[in-house]
Structures are given as C-alpha cells and as structure tokens.
Image (tube, grey):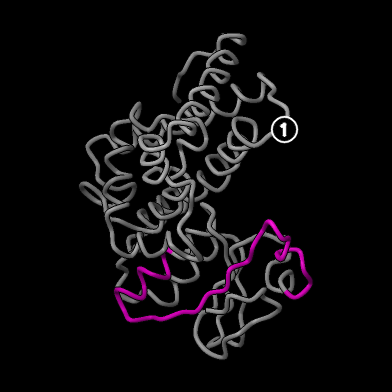
Amino acid sequence: MSSEKPTGLIAKSGIELLTWGTPNGHKASIILEELKEAYGKDYVWQGINIGQNIQKEPWFTKFSPNGRIPAIVDHDRNQFAVFEGLSILTYLTRHYDPEHKFSFTDPDDISLAEQWMAWQHGGLGPMQGQANHFYRLAKERIPYPTQRYVGETERLYGILDQRLKDRDYLVGAGNGKYSIADIANFGWVNICYFSGVDLAKFPNLEKWWGRVSARSAVKKGLSVPSESKFGNATYQKRLKEDKEFRENEEKLKDLADKAKAQYSYKYSSP
C-alpha cells in the first residue's frame, strides 16, 4: 500500500478499497478481512485522509459521488464502484461469500439483516456521529445538543442491548450467526467512549462487542489504514495510563452530566 497521497487507483485486478479509520470505513475493511480469511480473497487499500479532504477530489468522487469514505472498486467486474458502507457489505457478500459465512439464504434472515443494517445506517450512525461532534469535537460546548445526541445514542444502544438478550449475534436462528449485520453496527459501538457513552451500562451489548472484537479478521480490519486512536480498547488503556487524558475525560463527562441535568434528561429505551 502506498504511503504517498493518493491521486487515483493503483490496482488492476481484484478489490481496491478507498478508506479511512472511521466506523464507516471499518465496515468495509472488516468484511474484506473476513473474506480474505475465509476464502483467500485478497484486496488492496489506499488511505483517504479525510482531514486533507482527499475524498472531495474529482478522482475520488468519480467512485463515491457523495465525497465520503469508504468506497470500493471491483477491478474484476469492469471497475464497478460501490460507495456507502451498507452497500459495500451487501455487494461483497453477494458476489464473494458463496458459502454465506457472513450472510444468509433464508429470506426472513436476509430481511432481518437488512433491517438491522438499515437501522444502523439511518439511526445509530447519524445520531452517534452528532454525539461525537457535540460531546467532544465542537469548539463551543452547547448543552442542549450534547445531551440530545448522547442521550439518543444511549437510547439506540438500549435497543441493541435488548436485541442481544439471550443472543450472541443480531441475526440468525437460535443464538444468531455473526454476519454483516454485526459488522455494520460494530464500528460505531467500538468508539462508544469517544462519543460519551458508557458501554458497561449495556451488558449484553458489551459482551457482543467483546465477542466481535476478538475475531482475528476484525482486529486486522480495525488496523486499516492504521489503528484508530478512538477505539474502546485504546481509550480504556489510555484512561488508565495517562493522567492528563483521564482528567480531561472527567471534565467532558461532567459537562455532559450537567447538560443532561439542565434539560431533565432521563434514559429510556425504546
């Protein structure tokens, strides 16, 4: 993989992934690592540094019109391009998961997987993205949107937690089967502390997060293009070892708690 600033495609065959280390980017890198491990389906990737706005350059928007990562280009299918994480998950399993190790054949399970992926795409991702911004990144600390979006993210986590009661995975008979439905949701849950959400408050979800995190392909996928500083495991490690970081996190939490109190926030789900 080239360390230089990308200016165009570099592969001639196979899947080429254009991505960055975000929850949406990790959807694509994780499923590609899973397919590589299961079937030997290799791929190449390029890091699209969103801080440099590479995703807005014309060569990139040719493949992703919305100017967002991730995108893939399938060189073995006439350079067919796919953008949006949900679409990438379904495309790759449709074409490259013949044994349905990460997808389903039963029509009801196919529908349920689509439902939980759509739920993430339209709910968890956008709401937690706003929580990230107002809880941690906004230059001005504004109480109302802070409690609004952190609270809504907690509500959505409650829905996942309830779904995972007596289940190992989101979709599938019995205790469920690890699938693209889990991959779609995992990237966001994996940065919950960055978003101001305490995963320990959702025990079923926390167990699921640990279960998915332990997969070797998931670990590899999270390192594309490089290991994120915002993942739960990295966050918890830094919280223990870095006093200044811990003190700053306590201040952020205090601001969020005050915002919730100011607007009489009370957790409820659904």
With respect to residue 257, does 180 lie above or below?
below
Q: Name which residue lies at 35% across and 54% down.
A: 109
Query: In the rendered structure, does residue 57 fall within the stretch colored magenta?
Result: yes
Task: Find the residue positioned furthest to the right.
Answer: 58
- 68 vs 35, left or right, is right
Question: In the picture, residue 46 is in which quadrant?
Answer: bottom right
Instruction: Give x and y (percent) for residue 79.
Output: 61, 84
Q: Nearer the viewer, residue 138 or 247?
A: 247
Q: Main secondary structure of the magenta part?
A: helix
- 83 vs 199, left or right, is right
Disc 1 designates what residue? 139
With respect to residue 94, does 68 lie above or below?
above
The residue segment tinted magenta is: 30-59
Instruction: Give x and y (percent) for residue 93.
Output: 42, 70
Q: What is the three-letter code of the residue carrying label 1?
A: Lys
Instruction: Give x and y (percent) for residue 157.
Output: 43, 33
